[in-house]
Image: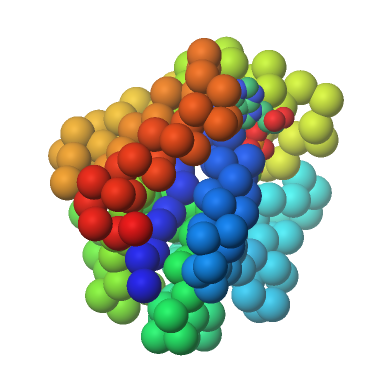
Amino acid sequence: MPFITFEGIDGSGKSSLAKLLAKELEKRGYKVQQTQEPGGTALGLELRQLLLRTSGEPPCPEAELLIYEADRAQHVNTKIKPLLKNNFWVLSDRFYHSSLAFQGAGRDLKIQDVMWLNQFAAGGLSPDLVVLVDCPVDVSFARRAGRVADRFEKEKREFHEKVRNQYLKLAKDESDIFLILESEKKSLDSLLKELIDELNKRGLL
Ligand SMILES: Nc1ncnc2c1ncn2[C@@H]1O[C@H](COP(=O)(O)OP(=O)(O)OP(=O)(O)O)[C@@H](O)[C@H]1O
Ligand SMILES: [Mg+2]
C-alpha cells in the first residue's frame, strides 16, 4: 500500500493535513495508520524527548543526526514495513527528507553523510509520495504562536529559512516523488483536494 510522508517547516500544516487525509481514506474504506518522526514507536518516543527537550545537555549535530536515524530504523523495521505488508496506508508526519533539511541544511552537516545514514536507517524503503507543506517562515511563526517551543522551534529565523530552502531544493531535485502544497493562502480543505487529485493522477487511489 502507499507510503506517504509529510514534510515542511514547523507549523506549516503537516499534521492537520495528514489527519484530514487519514479521515478521507478511512471514509473510502482503506486501512490507514498515521505515524510520526521522531516518536513513531515506544522507543522512538523516548528518543523524541531527547531530541526536542529544551533542558539537559543538547546533542551535537552529529549525535542529533544519529539519534534521528536510530528513531527511523526502529520506526521502519518495527512499524512502517509491517503495516505496509498488512495493507495499511501509512502516513508519516516527517521522514528522511526532514534529516536532509534540518540536519543537512539546518545544522550544516554534509548532505552525502545524511543521505547514506538515511538509506541505512530506512533499509531501502522510500516514500511513494512526499507532500511538502510549504509556507513562508513568518507564517509558520505566527501559526506556532502560543505553543511551547521545542528545541528546534527555538532556533533563529535564519535556521528555518535554511530548512525551508533546502526542502524546496529537494522538491526540485526529486520532483518525481514530491508534491508541493502552498499552505499560506489556501484552506486545509482545498489542500486536501489537491492532494487527493495528485493521488488519483499517480494511480495511488
Ligand atoms: N492551510 C492552512 N490555513 C490556515 N491555518 C492553517 C493551515 N494549515 C494549518 N493551519 C493551522 O496552523 C497551525 C499549525 O498546523 P499544524 O499543527 O498542522 O502544523 P505542523 O506542520 O504539523 O506543525 P509542527 O511541525 O509544529 O507539528 C494549526 O493551528 C493549524 O490549524
Ligand atoms: Mg505537527
Whether 163 is drawn above or below 120: the answer is: above
Whether 148 is drawn above or below 15: the answer is: above
The answer to whether residue 172 of the structure is visible from this angle is yes
Number of numbered tags placed on the structure image: 0
Residue found at the very far front of the displayed protein: 28
For image coordinates 63% across by 65% down, the residue present is 39
Q: How does the figure colour the protein chain or chains? A: rainbow
The answer to whether residue 137 of the structure is visible from this angle is no
- 41 sits to left or right of 172: right
Location of residue 44 (image quadrant)? bottom right
**Quarter that holds the N terminus:** bottom left
For image coordinates 63% across by 41% down, the residue present is 16
Whether 123 is drawn above or below 19: the answer is: below
For image coordinates 39% across by 34% down, the residue present is 194
Location of residue 181 (image quadrant)? top left
Instruction: Tell me residue 138's x, y (percent).
Output: 57, 13
**Quarter that holds the C terminus:** bottom left
Instruction: Tell me residue 80's x, y (percent).
Output: 47, 76
Instruction: Tell me residue 108's x, y (percent).
Output: 37, 39
Q: Ligand 2, what quadrant?
A: top right
For image coordinates 68% across by 41% down, the residue present is 151
Relative depth, front residue between 105 and 203: 203
Location of residue 154 (image quadrant)? top right
